[in-house]
């Protein structure tokens, strides 16, 4: 049998770098080319080449098969494969059950502790009916002889949400002291919310308050939520009182502006009528025979003063009538806070919903655990790549076919790797 020595490539074969001083030529070639200079017989050479070509052909076939499977995955997928993939998923979850359970416990237990520390909250609500402007004083004006008038009906409660969210109303709520049963002193919202900055305090109070309007019916719902039931009710009462005060004293409308204008004009014309009547009376006192006199100067002056007094009186009467109508218009145009449901002290909590929140957090943690398990499984499958498996099969085939040569090669490789 003929023996010889030859360089032969072995995939994955590596040697450590010993340095230029102590490294031989054969060692450097083997390290750079992943080859080994071995003694072999003709039979070993033919067997090694056959095994190497066989593994290489298997690798090419497997690569083609994987490519075809990726391209035709949708068209060649069968119900059995889907069921298998589902079972594989269940098996993966069962395999990683401890990891998933640990992630759920790590997330859910602290969340449960935080939820138990959260205080209960109580909401007090009130419902305000829409105020529709209608001609309720038409009969009264007809009886008074002032005539009739028409007004466009409008829902004057549309501004209620804007007024309730205004800074004026919120300042009225924050500046109020609230007497609570069981408390030694009145509660001030700045102390209750631990906020002295006015702007931040308004923002926090606005966060405790919700105002909603039903677009179909125009009903306004106001709600206040705090940790103290009685405080919620009293804050809501303060909101409604501030809204009523603004509507009665501060809110301006066209009818109210017209009333103020006519009031000023009536007072001015009343003074002018009084002045004209006083001038006519004084002139008659000076000329007591004004009714029987034939003096043209007296008759002319008397007629002038009398006409002036009549004109002033006619204007005064007209403006007085308009003023009375404007007053009725103002009363009719005044929006009234008509409560359907008055504020009440809540007896049941409005939040937090601890069970629902805990279930949501646990479900999120479960999904997170499943994602982590899938990622870890993908990493492990990546580590077990087909290239590594092919090389392992090549090593096993070489060991089985050529025990003496493979014993020499792989024993030295292990020694060099350990070094």
Image: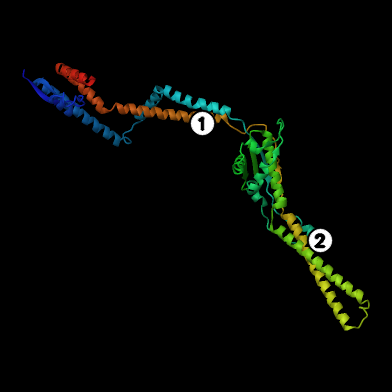
For label 1, the residue is 360
SS class, disc 2: helix
Query: Based on the displayed image, in which of its 4 quarters is residue 305 positioned?
Result: bottom right
- Label 1 Cα neighbours within 10 Å, binned few <14 / some 14-19 / many ≥20: few
Q: Is residue 184 visible?
A: yes
From the viewer's perspective, tell me whether residue 230 is left or right of residue 199.
right
Q: Residue at x 24, y 32 (%)?
A: 63
Residue 320 % position (x, y): 79, 63
Local packing at callout 2 (Cα closer than 10 Å; few below 14, some 14-19, many 20+) is few
- Residue nearest the observer in this picture, 256 or 176: 176
Q: What is the quadrant of residue 284 in the picture?
A: bottom right
Question: Is 411 on the left-hand or right-hand side of 131?
Answer: left
* Camera-side residue of 386 and 206: 206
| Residue 21: image location, x then y, percent | 16, 25
User: Secondary structure beneath disc 1?
Assistant: helix
Kindly identify which numbered label has been placed on residue 144.
2
Instruction: Name which residue lies at 65% across and 43% down.
Output: 221
Q: Considering only vertical position in the picture, is 166 above or below 267?
A: above
Q: Does label 2 or label 1 sit earlier along the sequence?
A: 2
> Can residue 127 be spotted in the picture?
no
Q: Which residue occupies 40% across, 23% down? A: 96
């Amino acid at each position: 049998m003929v023996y010889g020595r030859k360089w032969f490539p072995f995939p994955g074969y590596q040697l450590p770098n010993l340095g230029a001083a102590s490294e031989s030529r054969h060692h450097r070639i083997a390290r750079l080319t992943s080859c080994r200079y071995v003694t072999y017989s003709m039979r070993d050479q033919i067997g090694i080449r056959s095994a190497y070509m066989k593994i290489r052909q298997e690798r090419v076939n497997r690569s083609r098969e994987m490519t075809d499977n990726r391209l035709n995955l949708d068209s060649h997928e069968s119900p059995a494969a889907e069921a298998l993939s589902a079972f594989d998923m269940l098996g993966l979850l069962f395999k990683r059950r401890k990891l998933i359970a640990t992630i759920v416990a790590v997330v859910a237990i602290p969340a449960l502790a935080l939820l138990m520390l959260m205080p209960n909250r109580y909401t007090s609500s009130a419902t305000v009916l829409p105020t529709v402007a209608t001609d309720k004083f038409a009969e009264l004006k007809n009886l008074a002889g002032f005539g009739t008038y028409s007004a466009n009906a409008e829902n004057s409660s549309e501004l209620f949400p804007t007024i309730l969210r205004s800074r004026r109303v919120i300042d009225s709520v924050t500046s109020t002291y609230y007497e609570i049963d069981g408390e030694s002193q009145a509660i001030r919202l700045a102390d209750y919310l631990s906020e002295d900055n006015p702007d931040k305090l308004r923002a926090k109070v606005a966060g405790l308050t919700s105002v909603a309007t039903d677009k179909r019916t125009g009903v306004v719902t106001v709600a206040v939520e705090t940790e103290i039931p009685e405080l919620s009710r009293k804050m809501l009462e303060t909101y409604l009182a501030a809204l009523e005060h603004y509507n009665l004293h501060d809110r301006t409308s066209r009818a109210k502006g017209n009333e103020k204008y006519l009031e000023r004009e009536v007072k001015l014309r009343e003074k002018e009528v009084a002045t004209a009547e006083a001038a006519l009376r004084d002139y008659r006192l000076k000329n007591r025979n004004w009714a029987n006199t034939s003096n043209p100067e007296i008759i002319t002056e008397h007629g002038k003063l009398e006409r002036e007094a009549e004109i002033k009186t006619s204007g005064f009467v007209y403006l007085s009538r308009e003023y009375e109508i404007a007053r009725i218009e103002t009363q009719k145009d005044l929006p009234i806070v008509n409560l359907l449901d008055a504020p009440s002290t809540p007896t049941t909590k409005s939040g937090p919903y601890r069970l629902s929140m805990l279930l949501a957090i646990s479900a999120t943690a479960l999904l997170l655990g499943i994602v982590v398990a899938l990622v870890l499984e993908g990493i492990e499958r990546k580590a077990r790549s087909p290239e590594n498996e092919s090389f392992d099969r090549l090593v096993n085939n070489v060991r089985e076919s050529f025990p003496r040569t493979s014993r020499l090669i792989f024993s030295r490789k292990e020694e060099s790797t350990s070094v």
